[in-house]
Amino acid sequence: MEIHGRAPTLQWTVPTATRRRIALFSMPFQGHINPMLQLANILHSQGFKITMIHTEYNSPNHSNYPHFTFKSISDNFSEIINQLPKKDPSFYIKYLNSSCVDPFRNCLAGLLLEEPIACLIADAGFYFTQAVADELKIPRVVLRTSSLGCVVAYGVLPILSEKGYFNPPKEDYETSVPEHPLLKFKDIVKISINPQGMSEFVTNMHNQMKASSGIIWNTFKELEESALETIHQDFPIPNFTIGPFHKYFSASSSSLIEQDRTIISWLDTQAPKSVIYVSFGSVARITELEFQEVAHGLANTGLPFLWVVRPGVVSGSEWLELLPEKFLERVGDKGRVVKWSPQQEVLAHPATGCFWTHSGWNSTLESICEGVPMVCSPCFVDQPIIARYVCDVWKIGVLLKDDFERLGIEMTIKRVMMDDEGEEIQKRIHCLKEKVNLSLVEGGSSYRSLQSLVDYILSF
Ligand code: UDP
């Protein structure tokens, strides 16, 4: 059974008498809504009252959270989203940062008339909220939903854009970027098709993060120690690394799409660590040709697989009509295709042996927490940076080289699932999994950081 609104029980809580209200405001995308709702649950368990402000577009399901108050602000994003360039998230974000100003201000001002609010916790991407918080004289803490390493890399993006690095000659693709040697030129190309828009967004977001009262990160110190040092220098305000948020609970609770739970009983019939789990998250898209190469590549491994084909993952397609002819008959019971999965449970299942992912930050953290090695196919924004950390820093995954070409897919998956290299990856990711667990128990880094965060909010 899926657990939705049940708040977790941690070892310490703020006395109920001191209960204060916090208002939280998430960006309306799955990868942002999940960590914001998880954070709200964590803070609720610490004795705070929660008001979630959200846009009408991608509204979370209120009935899953009977212990929260919800306030919806009007926006016409549903009508406009199809007219915005799909591959340019900076465009959406700019739009939201201007269209939400008045409704958000009115909503927050209305809430303040009802009851004092200890602080606003806003998604860092909603950079406009700092001016509103200042105007209404309420402290603003931000939630940054990506990794520390990504934010460090984003710091140099405006310089890279000025230098024309988003448009390098093809022969430079494999060369490291001098200003950030972890990244290659081909990674920069992937981050955005609109370098100027992306740089403008990053500059606005980082300026308003610096102006905030503090930053909450969905990561843990031991994973990103060196990036944390840079973050402390670049953002000299309180930083709280209290993640991974989803580990405070027993199951995922904030899915916007219905999760197909029938696959758990199928996983139960598979051998330990035998199944390839494939999902490219809630936003990434692939072409028709790539979709067919994925299908052939998976089938050619001969290994069992669970493939999440989100409707619309191929532009213009309904769902499975673009699969190669007789594909499902050919793979039979070896393969399962679903629209959306209970991902955290799939990754935690003993049968899951490898996660072929788009390297979204939530997916990456979820994989680390369950010790599942990754094959990485980053699509855009922070994903190419996260994939570099996974493959070249933590060495817990392998980057798919010839993107979406059937032989490359088959070979790369087999490297992770069957080769000695895969065993080494497995050992390293298990070591990280143990570090995650230690960070969350009493005395651990995330545990202590959460205590500091609670004390900090109570000090406002
Ligand atoms: N997710 C899910 N079912 C799926 C695929 C994804 O519940 O079939 C969840 C996943 O557990 C994660 C989120 O959707 O929490 C995706 O976030 P991520 O940051 O990985 O990627 P995004 O969707 O933002 O690109």
Image (cartoon, rainbow, N blue to C red):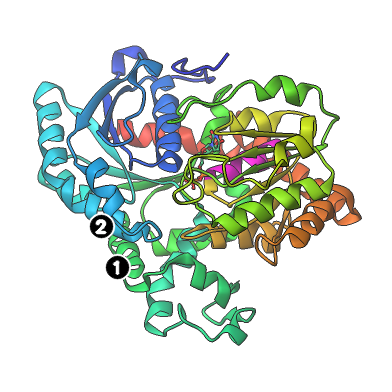
Observer-nearest of 390 and 326:
326
Q: Which residue is drawn at 31% across and 30% down?
A: 59
Q: Mark 1 Cα within 10 Å, few/some/many (few <14, many 20+)?
A: some
| Total numbered labels placed on residues in the image | 2
Q: Does the segment drawn in magenta span residue 366?
A: yes
The picture places residue 111, in percent across and down from the top left corner, at 14, 27
Q: Is residue 171 above or below residue 30?
A: below
Q: Is mark 2 on a helix, strand or loop?
A: helix
Residue holding disc 2: 94
Residue 208 visible somewhere in the drawing = yes
In whole angstroms, how far apart are the C-alphas of marks 2 and 1? 9 Å
Residue shown at 78% from the left, 38% from the top: 331
Q: Is residue 252 above or below residue 189?
A: above
In the displayed structure image, the side of residue 169 where residue 305 appears, left or right: right
Q: Which residue lies at the image location 29% right of the left edge and 56% below the top edge?
A: 84
Q: Give the range drawn in magenta.
A: 362-371
* Camera-nearest residue between 151 and 5: 5
Q: Mark 2: which amino acid? A: Lys
Q: Is residue 264 above or below residue 57?
A: above
In front of the other: 350 or 19: 350
Q: Label 1's element?
A: helix
